Amino acid sequence: MSEARLSLAILISGRGSNMLAIADSCDRGGIGARVACVASDRIDAAGLVAARGRGLEAFALAPAAFGSREAFEDALAERLDAARPDLVVLAGFMRILGPGFVAHYRGRMLNIHPSLLPKFKGLHTHRRALEAGELAHGCSIHLVTDELDGGPVVLQGRVAVRPDDDEASLSARVQAIEHILYPRVIGWIASGRLASREGRPWFDGRALDGPLVEEFDGTGFH
Ligand code: GAR
């Protein structure tokens, strides 16, 4: 049974709340996937402790220990490949990945970004959305390409920005929907509903022209 499940390598840099939400969904058996390993570029990532605490294989590789970005990424890919992942899941992995690494996992690497892409690529997305006076904000799950936060988006979750929102409150609502939507997309891949063909996402047998969008109410839940 377990061998038939989609095998995931999850990359984190911090808290790992998305990684844990995915691991929970795997454990509940609803998404047809299993976590093969958790990797971090930060030895002090809190998510590593949490992953090990629930019996997952988890390791860190510090980029500073390598002579170049390529050397770090080659070593990371070697460790990941030893776990034989079907899918590489970037879940708060805060390093820009080079073209060699991206090419190695082309079509089988996902990222989650805390904005409604193409808005607010990069960092501090919640603050920037507030400063821009956005009425809606959210998260995007996309295939990874060479362009930072630029690959085709599969699914977006949208929340309304409230007049009294600050960075913390908006971030908390967006994270709540990330934890719902990231496992869902992985489940679609595991079941064959979603696939990458020639760099484009296909969903239920047709190419996606744009992202699927799910609206959430102000609480972060439907
Ligand atoms: C998540 O909100 C994710 O969208 C964001 O980092 C957070 C990680 O939280 N990712 C990015 O900003 C990538 N550009 P977590 O460690 O608790 O899952």
Image: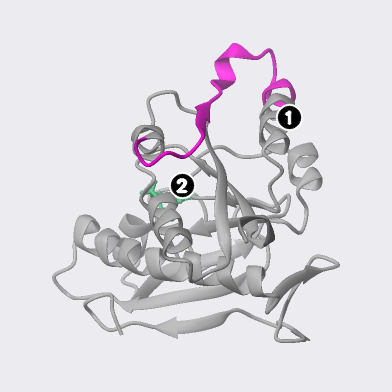
Residue 131: tell me if it is visible. yes
For the question of whether residue 118 can be seen, the reply is: no
> Relative to 125, does residue 73 appear above or below in the rendering?
above
Q: Identify the residue position indicated by label 2 in the image.
A: 92
What residue is rendered at 38% in x and 38% in y?
Answer: 47
What mark, if any, has residue 181 been given in the picture?
A: none
Residue 213 is situated, as x and y percent measured from the top left of the image, at 50, 82
- Residues drawn in magenta: 53-72
List the single residue furthest toward the right: 198
Question: Identity of the amino acid at label 2?
Answer: Gly
7 shown above or below 52: below
The residue positioned 63% from the left and 50% from the top of the image is: 148
Write down the residue under mark 1. 78
Q: Mark 1: which amino acid?
A: Glu
- Left or right: 53 as drawn, with respect to 102: left
Q: Nearer the viewer, residue 30 or 187?
A: 30
Is residue 67 magenta-colored? yes
Few, some or many C-alpha atoms within 10 Å of disc 1 (few <14, some 14-19, many ≥20)? few
106 vs 161, left or right, is right
Q: Are marks 1 and 2 in contact (CB under 8 Å)?
A: no
> Cβ of disc 2 within 8 Å of ligand 1?
yes
Q: Label 1, label 2: how many angstroms apart (C-alpha)?
A: 21 Å
Looking at the picture, does residue 39 appear above or below residue 118?
A: above
The quadrant of the picture occupied by the C terminus is bottom left
The image shows residue 20 at horizontal and vertical percentages of 39, 51
What crowding class fits label 2: few (fewer than 14 Cα within 10 Å), some (14-19), or many (20 or more)?
many
Residue 155 placement: quadrant: bottom right
Residue at left 56%, top 82%? Answer: 212
Q: Position of residue 128 (x, y in %)?
A: 36, 58
Of residue 26 and residue 153, the one placed in the foreground of this image is: 26
SS under mark 2 = loop
Any magenta on residue 122? no
